Image (spheres, grey):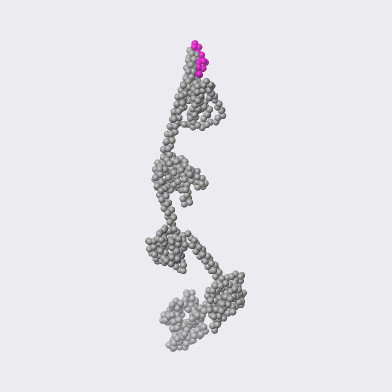
Amino acid sequence: MKWATTDAENCSRAAQEMHGSERQWREVFEHNPVMYFMVDASGIILLVNAFGASQLGYEATELIGQSVLNLVFEEDNKEFVRRKMSLCLQTPERSISWEVRKRRKDGTMLWIRENARAMWWSRNQLIMLIACEDISERYWGATESVQLAALVSSSDDAIISKTIDGTITSWNAGATNILGYQADEMIGHPITRIIPPELHEEEKQILARLHRGERIRHYETIRLAKDGRRVEISLTVSPLFDQLGKVVGASKVARDITERKLAEQALRETAARLRALTETAVDGVILIDARGVVLMFNPACEKLLGYSADTVIGENVRMLMPQPYRHEHDRYITNYRDTRDPKIIGIGREVIGLRKDGSTFPMDLSVGEARQDGESIFVGIIRDITERKLAEQALRETAARLRTVTETAVDGVILIDARGVVLMFNPACEKLFGYSADIVIGENVKMLMPQPYRHEHDRYITNYRDTRDPKIIGIGREVIGLRKDGSTFPMDLSVGEARQDGESIFVGIIRDLTSRKRTEAELEQARAELVRVARVTALGELSAAIAHEVNQPLTGLVSSGNACLRWLAGDVPDLKAARESVERMISAGSRAGEVIRRIRALVGNAPPLRDRLNINDAITEVIALIRGEIQRNRISLRTKLSTDVPLVLGDRIQLQQVILNLILNAIEAMSDVGPHSREL
């Protein structure tokens, strides 16, 4: 750079000496093979030689009048140059140098070494002469060397140099990472130290090729690590030449491909599994490119569509589609290439497939997209849904029949979920409860129940979810229904459970019991009437005995009355005797009244009344009523009644009817017995 400084000083002296010969000075300035700028104290370019302007891609006239700082590459560098120029102006006649990046007109950058000197020009004007040297090549060369060294040092690949006889001369950090040896352990040692014995011959062949000046690229082989591991590497070997072109060594770049090899092995295994999967899959698997050409056609496809893979592969997939799908497929492929609108990519839909024999069948088609060599490929999964369609049709027909049954059924049919929400409410239910289906569906079924059933239903649902104790599931019971108008009615409820989408649903069959209950009440009333008639008939047969039972206390009543009158009619009334007669009258009247009460109870039309009673008292009352009949038939009656009999639950009249019938049957049975004694 010394010559650039000398040129600036010489130019300055020449300018002073040739103050009156400006033309001669300009000749020196213009034709100097160094970039020259003359700038004023503010940095405005006054003159620039042709060489300097051309190096920056300008004409001289384009630069004159501009600030020299406009040529500096970055803002921070501009401030740096401004400080250097200020220092130069402060010390005239002293040269100052610096390095800076300058911007060419086309935007590219040059590294420049600038040498500046301030001087006084005519009329006492202070100017600067700046001589510029292009140092880009030197700078980039040094930079590239540093970068290359850094690249070798930081490379993950092993970069090794060796002599032509195989002695290692350099060993980078990448080689240490891959093979475990430090540089000082390997430099000066033969390369065969890291080559398996069985591959030494391979190394000789590599050296022979290097002698011929050949370069070996991406040669896959094995090297030995310090810990004994066999490392798979990809090797690139380049010969090194001296100045005479003679091969003196080699540079090796080795990349550890162990992981890649493992990945390739895994990929091969995955591919093998994929082939096994596609070849054994029940569903058809077909692979096509972006033009619709078939790339793969698995055995399930062959079975489904009747074609062999050899026939289909290489053909357009539309051959497997009937119209209008065939025509639409070409349009779809074109549209997808133009718009990337996937439509069915990533989803499934039902389409029709065309077999080799011309028959068609419904199939479920799922399409996925992948990329191969930068282009789209599409995987289609095909499932024959013929059986599913038949099952769906059968299901629809069954559902239609079920709807017909439920809609025409006389009994109410109601369907609820596990929370009690109504899912179905047939017309018979509408008629029974007075609600339309639209009002009830979606509501809780308890709206159809009066209390306490309504409250119990919520508790029952909760209990069933927690314990799975069905209680009434699978059986029927009588409950009460609540109509829309608030009235209630008896109904028979049968509940069954089923599963839908993994959850319980319950079907209730409802039958109105109003008519049946009315009939049962009428039958019960008729039965009670028949029983009463039977009792009356039985008492009719006992009329003589009953008359005797009634007449006897009445006769006693009359006799006691007459006796009482006599006692009272005497000169001195016998009040004591009269009182006794009245007491006998009262007793006889009570006896007669009790007989009549018993008869009325037996022949009355009172409804059955269940109550706790003493069975001994009921038997004694019946015996007292028919005692005369027993005596008339010359029967000796003995009773043996326990004194510790507990109270029983029953209807007194009905029980006495049974006892009466038993005694009458016994009397009738002994009517044919001769003069022998009769005992009951």
Depth check, front residue: 261 or 176? 261
Q: Is residue 404 above or below residue 45?
A: above
The spot of residue 430 in percent (x, y) is: 40, 44
Depth check, front residue: 85 or 284? 284
The spot of residue 103 in percent (x, y) is: 46, 77
Q: Is residue 634 magenta?
A: no
Q: Is residue 574 magenta?
A: yes
Left or right of 621 in this view: 65: left
Residue placed at 44% from the left, 58% from the top? 384
Left or right of 73 in this view: 149: right
Depth check, front residue: 289 or 562? 289
Using the rendered image of the protein, determine whether residue 191 is visible from the camera's viewpoint: yes
Which residue ends up furthest to the top in the rendered image? 571
Depth check, front residue: 488 or 141? 488
The spot of residue 127 in percent (x, y) is: 46, 82
Q: Is residue 544 above or below residue 414?
A: above
Using the rendered image of the protein, determine whether residue 118 is visible from the camera's viewpoint: no
**Dominant secondary structure (helix, strand or loop) of the stretch shown in magenta:** helix
Q: Is residue 420 above or below residue 660?
A: below
Magenta residues (range)? 570-585
* Label tally: 0
The spot of residue 435 in percent (x, y) is: 40, 44
Residue placed at 40% from the left, 49% from the top? 400
Residue placed at 50% from the left, 27% from the top? 662
